[in-house]
Image: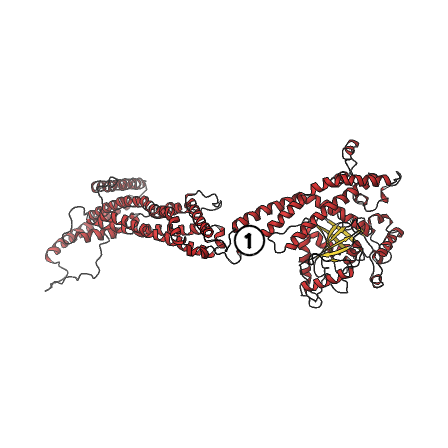
Amino acid sequence: MGETGEGQAKDGIAALGEVLIPAINRVQDAFAAAGGLTFQLDLPQVAVVGSQSSGKSSVLESLVGRDFLPRGPDICTRRPLVLQLVHSAKGDEYGEFLHLPGETFTKFTKIRDEIEAETNRGAGSGKSISNVPIRLKIVSPHVLTMTLVDLPGITRVPVGNQPKDIEQRIRSMIMEYIKHQSCVILAVSPANVDLANSDALTLAKEVDPDGSRTIGVLTKLDIMDRGTNAVAALENKVVPLMLGYIGVVNRCQADINAGRDIRSAREAERKFFVQSEEYSSVAQVCGTINLAQRLNEILVRHIHKILPRLKRQIEFAREENFHKLQSLGDWSQSDSKSAQGALLLKMLTEYSQFFANHLDGQDGNLPANEVAGGARIRHIFQNIFVKELQGVDPSVTLTDKEIQTAIVNCSGIRGSLLMPEIPFQLLVRRLIENLLEPCLQCARFVCEEMIHIARRCEPERMGMLPNLQNNLRSAVQSYIEDCLTPTEEMVSNLVNCELAHINTSHPDFIGGSQAIATVLDHKKGLVEQSKKKFEDESQSLRQSLSTPFKMNPHEQSESLNSEQKKRKQDGEGTARDRQSGWIASIFGGTNKGNTESIYLQEPPKVLRVSETKNEQEELEVAVTRLLVSSYFGIVSKTLQDMVPKVVVHFMVNAVKSGLQKRLVQLLYKEDLFASLTKEHSDVATKREKCQKTLKFLHVAAHTLDSIPKVLDQSSSSGARSSSARRSSRRVSPKRNRSEYAGSENSHPNIKSPPEAPASERRKSSSGPLGRGLASVIGR
């Protein structure tokens, strides 16, 4: 690209910067002046970072061309200073503080005094720091338009009244600015200190590891040790950054004490780089003028790059705050009674409808990660109540002793010859009575769940009216609990109906004869199974005994004789026992001796049935168990079906259909309108902040949306001014690029893009602004 292309690129960037940066500044000022907004906008700016006494203040003053910053041996920058530099084509030069609207400062000593005073007002008169920024706009013909943020210098040792963690506080403050992708980092490092140990670069690397938005500035090049220089660092070979480094030479303290102005200091800086043999290779990228041009170009490109994302962020925030404002409502305490009544009736109606939809599963706001609404009530019915009743097994609940005891007790004095019916009814009623409590508990669970659902159905803005919220909760809970009473009565009646009549004629009941047949068949099956098992074991025994073994005749004869003798003795003993047994039973026995009296054993205080049962008793117990299990299963299934129906009819549906009427009866009273519609104390504050934020978001969106229109309008005027400059400029074709210091492509370590084809260059020649914008985007 030749001189004409370079000039056009600079003109385009300058024109673009004159539009973009002021627009961003207007948005920034609007949000800063508002204060207390519920939304923070990350706007593009350049943050100046460096250690204490690294030369940050001198760099800023060189960029402005005026002495306006406080100076001293200790920490001077104790609050962030947002410095907006605005180029004045008319030659005006003044400063304005955002906290003093309408007041201009033409003397820069007054600006310094006001910075010190405002710092003391916000951070105290000592050496403590504050993160509340000071906003200063300087309009001057000697500056390029850009926005800089001067941050406190990094310090390690607290002095004066500074807290012990002053270093961590300063680092945290700096991080709050440079962590955002919209921030360009200006890392200031003294050249007489090892660049690898630079505090500014260390912090920048934490948030910008690839160095894509960090530009390095090396100060104090003129006071380095003899025999050393910073050429390698300026050539981007020590700690590489994508935006490279720029070297500057500021005034020393002796110059400042002697009153040397910045203009003469700039001339001395220019001579230093031009006359220095060491820095001749990098002189084209050094100096304050080059730094200002580079910062302006980088900031313009950065704004242009993130502008679409910034617009989307503002649009999203507008929509979010609009919905929040709607949820906060637009009523006020000064409304008339009719307006308050209409609002109250509307909220009660909407709440009742929302509650009904929540129970029916027709609410579109039901959570996606949990069961809610009416589905929770169905869970109580199916997975808690029904499952619990299905798990009750009378065959496990009733023991044989309990059944046999019931049979014996119900037989009374007479006893029983056939299967008794009374024990069956007694045991069945006992089990049915046990079902009453889980049935009532099911109704109570649903009541508690409906109260919980009612709380979740309260709209967000209900919390802004505490009196209405409390009265509504009390009324809804009272109505649901009122509906619980008839529900419990009906459930109790269901169980009482089952107790009142044991319907042995039920078609699903097994019946007595069938129960006996079932038990006998089961017993027969067990006998046959035992017989088969016995035969199998006998067969196995015979097979094991048929195994041949050797024995001599003498041993065999002795074994046979001993076996016969044993059998004979056993037979005789058994005969004697039998004889003595039945004779003793008749005559009182022969071993007890003669007794004159007979005494009966006293009955026990607690009499229990015998552990052993005869065949008749076993049959009675088994049949009774089968009858009880059969009838209990019928009753359990009936209650599993009827209890949920009763709960839904008497409580769920009753609340759904009658809730609105009940709420209107209790709450819609004219003497309660003012109290129920009274807002919470902080609602008005939240609404005001939300309205304020929404207002400034509208302003920001309008400002950014107007940028393309301004660019189009300035395109034609830019073309005319550029044409006039080209006609008055005589360019020698033999001049090379090194003569145009300050251009981005003149940096020795930043490659220029390939030159576009001639056809594309002709297409893009619609004016200097258009060509400059194309150049900016291309880079």
Q: Is residue 453 left or right of residue 295?
A: left
Q: Is residue 654 left or right of residue 743?
A: left
Q: Nearer the viewer, residue 219 or 553?
A: 219
x and y percent of residue 442 in the render? 35, 50
Q: Is residue 74 above or below residue 449?
A: below
x and y percent of residue 176 in the render? 66, 55
Residue 236 visible, this angle: no
Residue 88 visible, this angle: yes
Q: Is residue 363 left or right of residue 428?
A: right
Q: Secondary structure at mark 1?
A: helix
Q: Quadrant of the C terminus?
A: top right
Toward which corner of the image does residue 118 lie, by quadrant?
A: bottom right
Which residue is found at the position 85% from the left and 60% from the top?
260
Q: Is residue 346 left or right of residue 249?
A: left
- Mark 1 nearby-residue class (10 Å; few <14, some 14–19, many ≥20): some
x and y percent of residue 275 in the render? 89, 52
x and y percent of residue 503 in the render? 22, 44
Toward which corner of the image does residue 227 lie, by quadrant?
A: bottom right
Residue holding disc 1? 687
Q: Is residue 100 above or below residue 297?
A: below
